Image (spheres, rainbow, N blue to C red):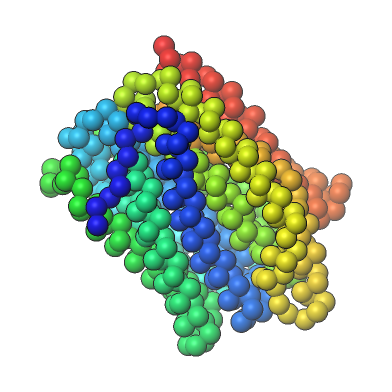
Amino acid sequence: MSAKIKDMTTGKPLPLIVSFALPLMVGNIFQQLYTVVDTMVVGKALGVDALAALGATDWLYWMWLGMIQGVTQGFGILMAREFGAKQFESLRSVVGRSVTLSTLSAALFLILGQVAAEPILTLLNTPPEIMDWSLLYLRIMFLGIPIVMAYNLLATILRSLGDGQTPLQAMIVAAISNILLDLLFVLAFRWGIAGAAIATLIAQVISSIYCLLKIKKIEFLTLHKSHFALKATMAGRLLALGSPMAAQNAIIAVGGMIIQGVVNGYGVAFIGGFTAVNKLYGVLEIAATSYGYAMITYVSQNLGAGKIHRIRTGMKWAVTVALATSALISAVMLVFGKTIVGAFISGTPVEAAAALTVGVTYLTIMSICLPVLYILHVTRSSVQGMGNTVLPMVSGIAEFVMRTSGVLLLPTLVGENGIFIAEVLAWFGADLILVPSYFIMLKRISR
């Protein structure tokens, strides 16, 4: 039942990065599996309207989830650095104060989510026929924000110590639970879209408890009351890392919501096809996010240990393996994309055919440009691991500018495909900031 702690300051970089990332990939596959099952069960059992209702909430919920992940990942940078430096008392202080700040943040996010849900859905031109379902789904998911915060913080603590195994195990348990509960709540109990939301939250409770039990076995993380007390200096350091990452994700999500607002004007069939591929978006970037988590931990630990040369070597290997992985995933999606998208869609023959055409086109465009997204994740995480979360936030602003300007201008030039191209342009815009930022930060810490 013990955690699999890994010191990434010694040993060959490539095996360390890959062995850390692989369990996270498998864990992310299971996480995406229950997201995909949610979508498939709702789409097949309740029809295109229900699928569109889920899609109408995607970016708004992701905004809150992104802020939660940004805050906790920022805290994890300092945890990994203290672990790499073998400063265990300081590590305990970082963990304890991260728990306190996360608790306060969860309460704030929960209140903001409940207040903002209906006005933002209205602002996004959510079609009246799916408004009630979308709002119900969001209300339930926002009530679960403390659960989501708990899991993300616990998983971050483990990853900062080099443990990619436990989050994997937790996600497998959660995925199986979520699938079974989806079938029970949506198909057997007929709870509709609310059943899908409740199933997801219960699954996240299970994964949080699993991670907590593992952490309690780590002797050097035994915390006392004093470790939870907020002190200005430590709280300031943690918020200086976490706040820009939360803001970065929020900015990206606002751009996504602008896209959703435009998409909502194209009708339910278009929303359904767009939603199906947005659920696959997570599958496309599974390996990218896993390499990103690996690089945050790898870079932070080695920076704490003062081993700058290992950061440079690790980055070269990470980029190489990320590009190879993205090429493989692109090939699979280009060959089997139509079949995969079709698994999400039901309804009248006319509705289903229209939604399928939209989905396949969107998936093809993203698959062709997938290497750009993988460079984004690896580079952004490396810059964050070096302790700079402001430059990645600037890259989020670049994403926002490219995404929103593209979605507002391109449809008038190339039709509805311009909406899909805008997403890829956002990736390019971020890379234009992140790649130079990596070299700037590497030169700075080398001094």
Coordinates of residue 162 in the picture (x, y in percent): 35, 41
Question: What residue is at 75 percent from the left and 49 percent from the top?
Answer: 365
The quarter of the image holding the N terminus is: bottom left
The quadrant in which residue 301 appears is top left
Looking at the rendered image, the quarter that the C terminus falls into is top left
Q: Position of residue 262 (x, y in %)?
A: 72, 57
Q: Give the quadrant of residue 134.
A: bottom right
Lateral position of residue 142 relative to residue 157, left or right: right
Q: Give the number of marks.
A: 0
Q: Position of residue 295 (x, y in %)?
A: 46, 36
Is 41 situated left or right of 367 in this image? left
Is residue 61 visible in the rendered image? The answer is no
Image x and y of residue 117, in percent? 51, 63
Which image quarter: residue 88? top left
The correct choice, above or below, for 347 with respect to 21 in the image is below
Q: Nearer the viewer, residue 302 or 81?
A: 302
**Rendered residue at 41%/66% (across/down):** 174
Residue at the location (61% across, 61% down)? 279
Residue 95 appears in the picture as rendered: yes
Against 176, is 12 above or below?
above
Residue beneath the point at 66% across and 47% down? 328
Q: Nearer the viewer, residue 313 or 279?
A: 313
